[in-house]
Amino acid sequence: MVDTNAKIITVTSMKGGVGKTEVSLNVAAAVKQQTGKRVVVVDFDIPYGGVAQAMSFSKERSLTDWMDIDPDVLLTPRQAESLVIQDEKTGIDFIPAIANTMDAKRFDGAAAKRILEQLLVFYDYVIVDSGVDLSSCTKTALVSSDKIILVTSMQNGSVYNNHQYKEDLIAHGVQPTNILLFINQVPKKDAGSQAERIEELYWSNGSSVTTASYAYFDPEISVCRNKRQFMYLTHKNSNFSQAIGDVVKKLGILSIEDEWFQEKTGFFTQLKKVFVR
């Protein structure tokens, strides 16, 4: 049975090289650290993907394994665990893209929907690193998402491609309120004014979407990735990590402390109502 509280968050872009996968990985790390809940990153960037390469994983477990599951079979937790790559340091699970390019034709919208539904049984947060396309599997992830993080860089091609992409997403039924704009790789000089210029373009042309945050271009991100580290975890005070934190807040995700406070506040509110009757 699907957990109705489980969430799908898709990180997407219509331009390669904007840091989409890095944002996916660090959002997952931030959500895991802040909530302590079950998080999986699944790579829908077909055929080659970027998650396995970024994490130096082999593809002995991949989307191919999930496609091979009999649709009528209900997986047990142990079976699901055997179909993911577990990262012991972070506690995050990973599913790389298909193991063989020959499987690309099999990974259609129906397969994507079935896999997402299966993952929602076992995880609180499913982070999808989407393809740079509007294939049926990408569209399935997008329309199934509770929130979409749209990543653009400052390059003109990225800005304008993703602006049109934003309009296309809305035309496909995605609510503008479910799209968060993340402006990445902003030159540090006059970063604020440059990001505001992009934000204004996305606000004033077509449907308006919320800007989650913006992050400077930072060479240390590549250094961390080459070491298979998460910038959010190892450089907590960096601008990029703070921007990722802003994204998680805009996603409406409560930290362990926030949930505790909310529960306590709710308890005392109810208690007060009892005594004032």
Image (spheres, grey):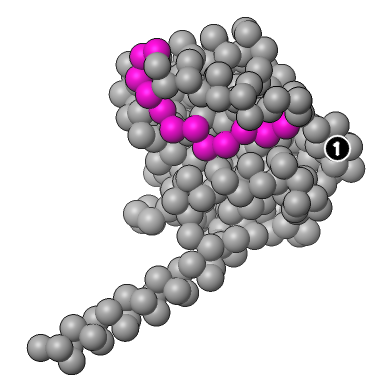
Q: Is residue 152 above or below residue 56?
A: above
Q: What's the residue at 49%, 32% (across, down)? A: 211
The one of 64 and 190 positioned closer to us in this rendering:
190
Whole-percent x and y of residue 236? 75, 53
Quadrant in which the N terminus is drawn = bottom left
Q: Quadrant of residue 38?
A: bottom right
Indicate left or right for 26 with 204 as reference: right
Q: Which residue is at the far left?
A: 277
Whole-percent x and y of residue 165? 47, 15
Q: Quadrant of residue 27?
A: top right
Q: Which residue is mark 1?
A: 220
Q: Secondary structure at mark 1?
A: helix
- Stretch of the chain drawn in magenta: 205-216
Crowding near the residue tagged with mark 1, few <14, some 14–19, many ≥20 C-alpha atoms within 10 Å = few
Indicate left or right for 277 with 166 as reference: left
Q: Is residue 163 above or below residue 22?
A: above
Residue 89 in view here: yes
Q: What's the residue at 39%, 35% (across, down)? A: 178
Indicate left or right for 129 with 260 as reference: right
Q: Reply yes or no: does residue 214 show up in magenta.
A: yes
